[in-house]
Amino acid sequence: MLEAISSSIYTISLTKLLEYKQRILNQQFSHILAMRKLFCLPLVCFLFTLATNCIMAQQAHIISTRVLLDSCGYFPQLSPDGQWLLYSTTDASQLLLKNLSSGTTIEIADKGYPGFDAIFGNDGNIYYITQERKKHHLIYRTGMCYDMSIQRSKRVLKAQHGRVQALRGTSGTIIGGERRIYRSQPQVGAYVYTSGATLHIVDEQGIEKVLQPITNSNGYLWATLSPDGSRVLFEVASRGLCICDRKGNVLSELGPFLMPCWYNNDYIVAMSNAGNDRIKGSRIWLIKADGTSVQALTPDSERAIQPMVAAGSIIYTIQYQGTIKQLTLDIPAKETPVITTNQKGKSTEIGHLPPCHKVDHPRVFINPGHGGHDSDDRHLPTYVHGVDDTLHYYESNSNLTKGLALDAILQSKGYQTVMSRTTNTTNDDLDLFEIVSLAANSGADLFFAIHSNATGTAARVNFPLALYRGWDDVPTTLGSKEIATSVMHHAIENQTTVWTHPQSVRGDWNFFHNWGYRVGLGVLRYNKLPGMLSEGAFHDYRPERERLLNDDYCWLEAWCQSLGIDDYFEQKNHFPSGVIAGTVRLANYQRPDLGEQAFAADTLQAANGAMVRLLNQHGLVVDEYRVDNYDNGVYVFKYVLPGKYIIEASYRNETQRIEIKADKNKSAYHQFYMNTQQEQ
């Protein structure tokens, strides 16, 4: 449990300087993680001093710092003329506009979570996206424009399912969806956007190129054109910032920073994020586009996030407080874009965004927690492999196994799915804000994070827990408590495990109250999708850990999750087959090897190697399952057609049979207790 904790900001700045020194020595880019492992401490200190001396001469100076908003402001945007501050509340439920001259504030929108994607367009108007749950809890997104001249919002792109984005072109603004697209004027110039792990560049003539500058990526985010239009800045999830030309040739790799934007043609502003670490902070950085210098603009203690460049200055938010500040540097920022207001917008049915599906299927963003066997992951020994085993149980392994299973199950049921990772490497250990942003960029209807839990003490327990953003009785996003309740209803029905307590459904603000007021889980912090984090069981309860070594048991947890997702989207009885599962244990043989707390049937020895057969009513074998040797006794028959069956379990010289019924989109369970004595 629970989430990745990002590296300290000190490490980011130190290793970035080391990277710069290495570039001086051999003109080759070296990944920050590799550099961290390469140097011993004395050499690190030497290179740090030398690299610092090299960079000092290139540092920018802060001319002024100004507070634009005292509190409760997030995702700030500044108008091109610097007169208006656009911002949202922390949960993106309100979009607000402040006149910086008079100090007056206008509420632009308070429905449909309008604050997450709002931008000032090239024409000075405000463009934003609202979302609405419609039939079967699908999310439809609408493109809106707030006309600054009349101070009124109007719909410019009607609601559609899937991803909808507000984008700036070089001479106009675009709201692009998967079915329709809106342009603020007929010619909007060149623009860029990301879709999964592809980069899309649309030129001045409307011709689109689909590029993949970095391969084997979990996704791209925050793509923007340089002020002169010649280069594209984007973030590669977990791997950091990149700059490529308009042909996709990578020009620079700049390290692990988030939410980048061009300061001018030579410099970039971005943030580093401490993730869920409640001690270390986040900072705003000024980075040379060629990678030769990096400079912190804010102190570590300030916890600065969400930078944006406009009107010749940088604005950002202070995390938790929501104070919005403005910095002015002694180097000029990018030119203020030309404002054109003499052309009317245009909406067309065919845009440049990905082709749509004719039917609006539910779309689920699946986030298997952690990634790679890194410091935020936990390894625990197993009895079979010994206390020194370092190869078998990691939470990241079972999370991914469950995530891949859920992905396959939902697709077989007709859902669309997007996964934050499909492999298990260090590069898959994404920053929490990256995960949230990938989910928002996917056009999903639901965010679903997969984890397992741990008490971290000798007081072992085992029960399923669902966490959502907000208080126990007041989720921040409509639908989050509903999905959490639905999933837990089916999770507790899994009879192949031993539960010590009922299922629990909690708001993360209550559950993690000791972290601070309204801190909660980083992966849910800025998530405006209905969503939850599933702690499917407790992996430090050793019998459960032994079950999690079984891929089919992980599949079964994913199956139970899919049933809860079916309920949420009102997809009952949609799937034609069901599941039969259970365990095979020895009735008269207590486990002598646990050495710790175990409950109920978990005190009995599993029938390792037992054969379980599924027979039809005529006695013919439909399927068979060999119980593994991980002391869990689990068997699972997947995708069983409805009807009556016989299950037959054989262990040594004993065979037991029982009739059982399979129903579509449901689970049936039976536990075998064999009377055969275990051989000494």
Image: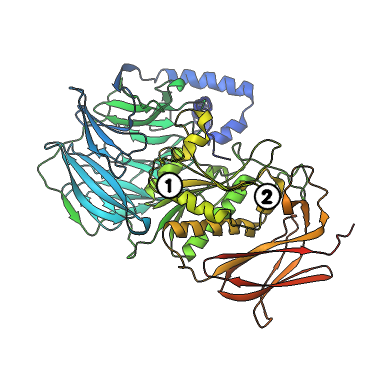
The image's mark for residue 207 is none
The image's mark for residue 544 is 2
- Residue 273, percent from left and from top: 46, 32
Q: Which residue is mark 1?
A: 480
Of residues 544 and 208, the one nearer the viewer is 544
**Residue 148 visible in the displayed image:** yes
In the displayed structure, does residue 117 sit left or right of residue 36?
left
- Residue 64, percent from left and from top: 30, 16
Q: Quadrant of residue 582?
A: bottom right
Q: What is the three-letter code of the residue carrying label 1? A: Ser
- Residue 408, percent from left and from top: 52, 61
**Residue 217 visible in the displayed image:** no
Looking at the rendering, in which quadrant would you find the C terminus?
bottom right
Of residues 168 and 670, the one nearer the viewer is 670
Up the image or down, 636 lies above or below 246; here it is below
Categorize mark 2 by other alpha carbons within 10 Å: few (<14), some (14-19), many (20+): many
Q: What is the three-letter code of the residue carrying label 2? A: Glu
Of residues 561 and 302, the one nearer the viewer is 561
For the point 42% across and 46% down, which residue is it? 438
- Residue 20, percent from left and from top: 49, 28
Looking at the rendering, in which quadrant would you find the N terminus?
top right
For the point 34% across and 18% down, which residue is it? 62
In the displayed structure, does residue 201 sit left or right of residue 597?
left
Does dot 2 land on a helix, a strand or a loop? helix
